[in-house]
Amino acid sequence: MTRIEANNPAVEFHDLTVSYEKKPVLWNIDMTLPKGALIGIIGPNGAGKSTLIKAAMGLLPLGSGYVRIFDKSLNDVRNRVSYVPQRESVDWDFPTSVFDVVLMGRYGKLGLFKRPRKADIEIAHDCLKKVGMQAFENRQISQLSGGQQQRVFLARALAQEADIYFMDEPFAGVDAATETAILAVLRELTEEGKTVIVVHHDLQSAAEFFDWIVLLNMRLIASGPISEVFNHKLLQDTYGGKLTVLAEVSELVRKRQIPNREKY
Amino acid sequence: MDLETFKTFFSFSDPNIISVVIGAVLLTSSSAVVGIFTFLKKKALVGDAVAHAVLPGICLAFILSGNKNPVILLIGAFITGWLSLISLDYITSKSKLKEDTAIALVLSVFFGVGILLLTYIQHSGNAAQTGLDSFLFGKAAALVGRDLWIFSGVSVTLLLTVSFFFKELKLIAFDSAFATSVGLPVRAIDQLLTTLTVLAVVTGIQAVGVVLMAAILITPAAAARFWTHSVFKMTIIAAIMGAFSGLTGAYVSFIAPAMPTGPWIVMVISAIALFSFFFAPKRGVVSRYLQQRQLQQSIMDENLLKELFHIGEVDHQPFKARSLKAILEERYFPKNVLLQSLKRLKTEGYLTHKNGSWAFTKVGHKKGKRMVKLHRLWELYLSEYLKIAPDHVHEDAETIEHVITPEIEARLEQMLSFPQEDPHQSSIPY
């Protein structure tokens, strides 16, 4: 394992273990990620990439360990955090418009019962413009292409005006033009000092996109600046060597329903 | 059902009639509004299970209290309604049974116990029990006096709660992971929605009855979905549809007091849903069929123009009139389809007709030429860029030529740098 600690960490994962329906999918993740970087989480299918950011967002119960963002617990920094779920996780036939979805990015700041104010509406307009979707404002979301859906999700995240962004596969199934547009927006964010953490599946583009890479396959293989960790040996460790023992043990734990940490 | 009774009812001069109407309309419309979110969260069957599960609660409350005080019956209904949901959750999370199986189990067990208790009560000889069975199929006419106030009160509370939490309910129904990530109390609001659903069922049964309650919860939402793409408008439309069916129920209860109102309300709301299913613009079946037919026709017309252009290409007389026989020799079309298409193209100004022969107008010739060009450009694109064998590209191009937009056409021309010939050495016309 090659683990380089960040000088100025935005996120810290400490001995994080996560199970999915009783099956452990992430084992003892320990790392820090730097502020203001564009960070890619890379690994094969089933490596636990999405699980890692879901766990960071408090969407999954943790088996052990903790995640701290800006050295605070998630609940204390919610307003500075934005999460972009996988595009397929929602029903795009839901009866709503593009603009409405982007406006949802403001709900966290608004709080319960409050209606969006003029300022919120203006922010939503601006964010749609940033992703080049202003012409689609009143479009039904069911009429969007995959790339357009992804841009709408990105606009919603921008509307949150966060300091750190967790994105689950924002480049999956998008056209080349959308890919360029999304990348430009992410770069702009990091130039403003914001931290962007992206789950990514394509090795080819990973080398061009990111400043910092996390290699993951059920456990941490490497975390560090791209120049240090994006090498043949570590990629081989991530993709090549079949983790037969770890996978088998996971399966046994699931079958026998063993709790992740012992009680006594 | 004579005109006189109709007039008496809809003049609303009898205070009794007014109270029944207000009650029925409030109950059905508030159920419809709550049902919107049950529907959007794809929990329609859960609503059905809850509806059936309130029956044992009502019966138990009656047995324990010995009277029909609606507040006590409501509390009983509420408890078993919630209990059914807890059992559902427990079964799905602790066993390997899927949700549909769990729903079927919970629904039948709770309803079975309810019927058992109801039968017991009916044979117990308690004089107060008469009318309890109206909870099975509903009796809007019973909505008078104290009952009316209590049931309406609950309905108004439901409507107000939904409007307070509208923004949150919508977000959670669309994307609950995101809602959690921005710090909304998703679990609490989910439980609130469940409580609202149970309450809607509990109050709605007075008008509709437990057996058919799910219809008034879900059908308005399903029907309203056909008419709009906005959750807010959908809610308004569903409320109006629900209210209308409630009004009908009240009317039926008025003219035929012995008749249960639930089935009537369900008939009306189902008729509305069926009408929406067939005739709603854009999403309705008829409208979709018409769109499809129009598409088929325009494909046929484009093919015909293309074939006429081909004929002219061979004898270098593009504007010469062609007989039906000449067209059919170029490509087979069923005769009636061909004639209809020719007539359409004539009315649209693409062809002229004289003595049984058909000739291009200028515009028609231009359009035919464009179709041939698109066909050949696509064939060339397939063989050059996708390396598909020339003898396999024709069939693809037959379909794709109809969908290429002028923008894609321009890009193809650029990419292939205005080629002269397609893969079969036919020249590409510009």
Image: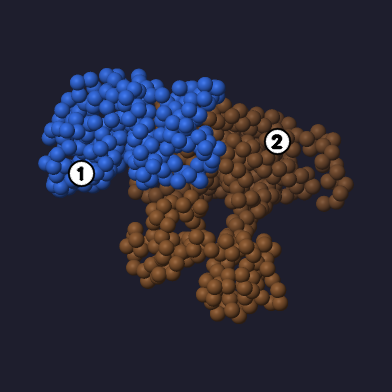
Chain colours: A blue, B brown
Which residue: 71% across, 77% down?
A: B355
Q: Are marks 2 and 1 on the same chain?
A: no
- The answer for which chain carries disc 2 is B
Q: Position of residue B137 (x, y in %)?
A: 64, 47
Total marks placed:
2
Q: Which residue is mark 1?
A: A250
Residue pushed farthest front? B316
Position of residue B257 in the picture relative to residue A92 (left or right): right
- What residue does disc 2 label? B23
Tell whether label 1 touches label 2 (CB within 8 Å). no
Name the foreground residue: A73 vs B364.
B364
Q: Would you identify the image quadrant in which residue A6 lies? A: top left
Q: What distance separates the C-alpha of mark 2 from that of mark 1?
A: 58 Å
Which sits in the foreground, B258 or B271? B271
**Percent position of residue B108, x then y:** 50, 50
Q: Secondary structure at mark 2?
A: helix
Q: Residue at x 53, y 42 (%)?
A: A140
**Amino acid type, residue under disc 2 in the picture:** Gly
- Looking at the rendered structure, the secondary structure element under dot 1 is helix
Image coordinates of residue B398 in percent, x first then y, are 47, 66
The three-letter amino acid code for the residue at tag 1 is Ser
Label 1 lies in what chain?
A: A
| Rendered location of residue B217, percent (x, y) | 59, 43
Q: Quadrant of residue B312?
A: bottom right
